[in-house]
Amino acid sequence: MRLAAALVLVSTLAPLARSSPPEPGPLPSLAAPPFGALLTLRDGDHLIHAERSSTEPHRVHLQWPDGRATVATVGPYAIVIDLPASPDTPTPPSASSTTSSSSAMSPPLELAVVRPLMPRAGLTLVRSTRPDEDGLALAARLADRLQIFPDLALSHTKHAIDVPPDDPRHGGQWYLDRIDIHDAWRLETGDPSVVIGVVDDGCDLAHPDLADHMESGTDLVDHDDDPSYLADTDGNEHGTACAGLVAAIGDNGIGIAGTCPECHLRCVRLLPGGRGGDVSLSDDIAAFERQLAWNVAVSSNSWGFTDRFPVPSAFRRAISTLISESRDGLGAIVVFAAGNDAREIFPDELYGIDGVLTIGAINAFDEAASFSNHGGPLDLVAPAGTLTTDISGRDGADPGDYTSLFGGTSSACPVAAGVAALLVAAAPDKPASELLAALLATARPAPFALPDETGHDALYGFGVIDPTAALLSVAPPDPPADEGPDTVESDTTEPTETDTHEAEPDVAEAEPAPIASGGCTTGSAPLASLLALALMRRRRPT
């Protein structure tokens, strides 16, 4: 029986009057403590001024040449990209060296390896062998000899604002109705072999709508193998809410259905309790190293750095390695929420990394949410998933097991991540780059967008994610065997009882709804035809 989907309007998703994208405001001034000596760090092409606090030597103010800035905490370690095999063996000077003697040898680096961080990305955690030198001083000293950056604890923030299955709350999942998910589910509902990593503040591993889909995870806050949420903490439902939107169990008679209702999950607890906090760069990298080890198909990330600054090169390398090497070399689709600051996002931030899918939020009327960040790196928009799983019992945002108050781009990102997982399930042999291209190419035009000549709009990206069109693009259905000139003679043959039964296996049962106009640039009629063919082919037997 089809459940009617109720449209739920949430105050946090107020309509945004369509106008030209707002100009980015002035960069925020940071209330930094008094600072002492100035050091210079090198990160790729960026020279960064680092100034220590004179009263808190482990606090440092970082400023990039364009004025962007942040405050971080310094630890004992640094991160090196492509560390030489024998780092403390004296080496000849480089061709650009200005040493007075041509026979002079470069002095030892005076560092020791702590541990490999992400070997396949060439990332290593190191420390100085000088007793009074921390990670900042080490990185500054070796800035001209290595690709090295201090293992800073940077402030992170969550991007949150407070065929139909028999799941009783599914009728309230208006956001899935807005992307015609029932049509997509008639083509693909996911597969347990498709694993989605949810990087957040931990998950409710025992939630009745999630537990059977949960595989082992990791906790990078307490450094153990239990990625559970921190109990009785404000905002601790965030990771559980994201996990439910991605892959809550479908057709199990309780709660809701995730966008990929047959996919599995692995949770990474990266963010501390509350609305965010400081996280070391090495733990950021470890989150993606673990997902690489798990061979995840999709990585869902509803968080980002609190301040806007270029993503450190080592972290960029870690994310890029997961994108290119997970799934045994086919790659993972890495999805990030665009953020809720109503500001322009820059290409050198997390959101602009090649291969990252950056998602903004829209409301029930396809209008860009007023808080959703915008700009060139924005790829697609998705409806905000307001109804989702909450921590079971009294903890979390609601005294029950579900909440209808989730929002922000945090709630749009996992909806898109679930769609990406559907594509992996439908076309498991296709590389992530091809699946990502299909998501972008088949997006439904946003009705209020004013796209440029490339089809991109600063507020809506390339449009609204369209799971049905994307699935048909990567896994087109086979045509019926009795079509075409080579089968004309068979028309004179009386169909047997078996033939008749196989010719219409599930069409009457499914009764597909018409596809909404404007769903794909190829038009709704071809899509409807393809969908009908797909229904005749039908997915795996249950």
Image: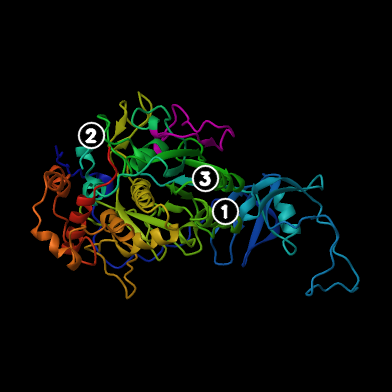
**Residue tagged by mark 2?**
169
Residue drawn at the location 29% of the way across and 62% of the way down: 442
As measured in the structure, the alpha-carbon distance from the residue carrying label 2 to the one carrying label 3 is 31 Å
Residue 255, picture quadrant: top left
Residue 254, picture quadrant: top left
Q: Is residue 237 magenta?
A: yes
Answer few, some or many: residues within 10 Å of disc 2's Cα (few below 14, many 20 plus, some between 14 and 19). some
Answer few, some or many: residues within 10 Å of disc 1's Cα (few below 14, many 20 plus, some between 14 and 19). many
Q: Sequence-wise, which precedes: disc 2 or disc 1?
A: 2
User: Where's residue 380, x and y in %?
Assistant: 34, 59
Side of 111 where 394 appears, left or right: left
User: Where's residue 28, x and y in %?
Assistant: 48, 57
| Residue type indicated by callout 2 | Arg
Span shown in magenta: 213-238
Q: Sequence-wise, which precedes: disc 2 or disc 3?
A: 2
Q: Which of pointers 3 and 1 indicates the residue nearer the eye?
A: 3
**Residue tagged by mark 3?**
291
**Residue tagged by mark 1?**
318
Dots 3, 1 in contact, CB < 8 A: no
| In this view, 262 is above or below 461 | above
Q: Secondary structure at mark 2?
A: loop
| In this view, 163 is above or below 51 | above
| Residue type indicated by callout 3 | Gln
As measured in the structure, the alpha-carbon distance from the residue carrying label 3 to the one carrying label 1 is 11 Å
Q: Secondary structure at mark 3?
A: helix
User: Where's residue 272, x and y in %?
Assistant: 51, 37
Answer few, some or many: residues within 10 Å of disc 3's Cα (few below 14, many 20 plus, some between 14 and 19). many
| Residue type indicated by callout 1 | Ala
Residue 462, picture quadrant: bottom left
